[in-house]
Amino acid sequence: MDLSPVMDGLILLLSGLIILLFAFGKLFPDVLKHEKWHGLAMPLRIIGGAISIISVLSFF
C-alpha cells in the first residue's frame, strides 16, 4: 500500500510526538521514574525529536 507523502509525514509526526510525550513524562509518568528505566529518557528524547524533524521535512 502506497501512502501519499503527506500521510507518511503525518504518521511520522504523530509517532514522534507520542515518543516525546513518553520521554518527557507526560504519557505514563510513573514508568521513567523507576530506577531501571531512568536511563532511557535522553535516548527517547533524541529519537522522538529526530522522527519529528524528519516528518516535518517530509512535508516539503
Image (cartoon, grey):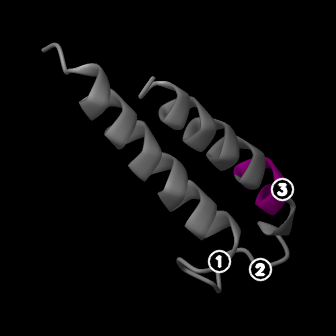
Label 3 near label 2: C-beta < 8 Å?
no
Quadrant of image for the N terminus: top left
| Amino acid type indicated by mark 2 | His
| Closer-to-camera residue (32/2) | 2
Label 1, label 3: how far apart the Cα atoms are: 14 Å
Disc 2 to disc 3, C-alpha distance? 15 Å
Query: Is residue 13 shown left or right of residue 50?
Result: left
Circle 3 crowding by C-alpha within 10 Å: few under 14, some 14–19, many from 20: few
Pointer 2 and pointer 1: residues touching (CB < 8 Å)? yes
Q: Which residue is mark 1?
A: 31
**Magenta stretch, overall SS:** helix
Residue flagged by tag 3: what amino acid is it? Answer: Met
Which residue is painted at 76% across and 45% down in the image?
Answer: 46
Q: Nearer the viewer, mark 2 or mark 3?
A: 3
Residue behind mark 3: 42
Secondary structure at badge 3 equals: helix
Residue behind mark 2: 34
Quick check: 38 above or below 25?
above
Return the residue found at the far top. Answer: 2
- Label 2: how many residues lie within 10 Å, few (<14), some (14-19) or many (20+)? few
Residue 22, compared with residue 50, is above or below; it is: below
The residue depicted at 56 percent of the width and 56 percent of the height is 19
Q: Earlier in the sequence, mark 1 or mark 3?
A: 1
Amino acid type shown at disc 1:
Val
